[in-house]
Amino acid sequence: MGSAIFISEIAGNRLKEIVKPIIELLAGIPSVVYGLFGMSAIAPLIRNWLNLDTGLNIFTASLILGLMIVPIIASMSEDALSNVPKSIREAGFSFGFNENGMYFPGYHSRTKRDNWQYFTWFG
C-alpha cells in the first residue's frame, strides 16, 4: 500500500511514468516463473543460510509468494487511489487533515471498496 500511495500521490509525473510500467511488468510475470526462480536461486540460498538438507520448504515458498504478490497489490491499490474523486480529498481537508493525514484515513473506505471490485464478478 505504501508503494501505491507513493506512486499515486507523492511521485512526480516523470518518476510515475518510469515506475508504474515496471510494476505492471512485474505483476504480469506468471507464477510458474516465480516458482522456477525460487527453486533455482532462492532455495539454495536458504539451504546454505539455514544449514538445511533441502531449501524447498514452506519458508522459501512464503518468500517467493511475498515477492510475487507485492507488485499485484501495488498496481491494484494505485489504480484504486487514482480513482478516488477530488471531492473526497476536499472533504478530508475540511475535516482538518493535512496532505500526510489524507493518505490513510481519507482514502481507506473508498479504496477498500474499489479493491474489492477486483475480486468479485459483480464489479
Image (cartoon, rainbow, N blue to C red):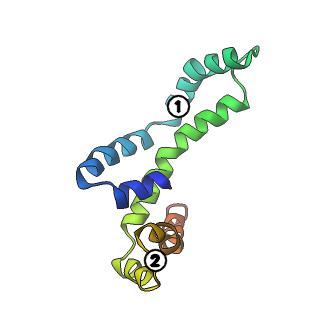
Furthest toward the left, the residue is 14
Q: In the displayed structure, would residue 93 be above or below residue 57?
A: below
The answer to which image quadrant residue 28 occupies is top left
User: What crowding class fits label 1: few (fewer than 14 Cα within 10 Å), some (14-19), or many (20 or more)?
Assistant: some
Would residue 32 be found to the left or right of residue 79 on screen?
right
Determine which of the numbered discs, if any, sits on residue 77 in the image: none
Q: Which residue is mark 2?
A: 97
User: What crowding class fits label 2: few (fewer than 14 Cα within 10 Å), some (14-19), or many (20 or more)?
Assistant: some
Would residue 92 be found to the left or right of residue 56 on screen?
left
Seen at 24% across and 55% down, the residue is 13
> What amino acid is found at the position of numbered circle 2 in the picture?
Phe
> What amino acid is found at the position of numbered circle 1 in the picture?
Tyr
Seen at 36% across and 61% down, the residue is 9
Would residue 87 be found to the left or right of residue 103 on screen?
left
x and y percentages locating residue 34 in the rendered image: 52, 31
Q: In the displayed structure, would residue 123 be above or below residue 59?
A: below
Would residue 21 be found to the left or right of residue 116 on screen?
left
Seen at 76% across and 16% down, the residue is 52
The nearer-to-camera label among 1 and 2 is 2
Q: In the displayed structure, would residue 10 be above or below residue 113?
A: above
Q: Earlier in the sequence, mark 1 or mark 2?
A: 1
x and y percentages locating residue 53 in the rendered image: 76, 13
x and y percentages locating residue 73 in the rendered image: 50, 52
Determine which of the numbered discs, if any, sits on residue 34 in the image: 1
Q: CA distance from mark 1 to mark 2?
A: 41 Å
* Closer to the camera in the image, 69 or 81: 81
* Closer to the camera in the image, 33 or 72: 72
Q: Does residue 40 appear anywhere in the picture?
A: yes
x and y percentages locating residue 70 in the rendered image: 51, 45
Q: Does residue 123 appear anywhere in the picture?
A: no
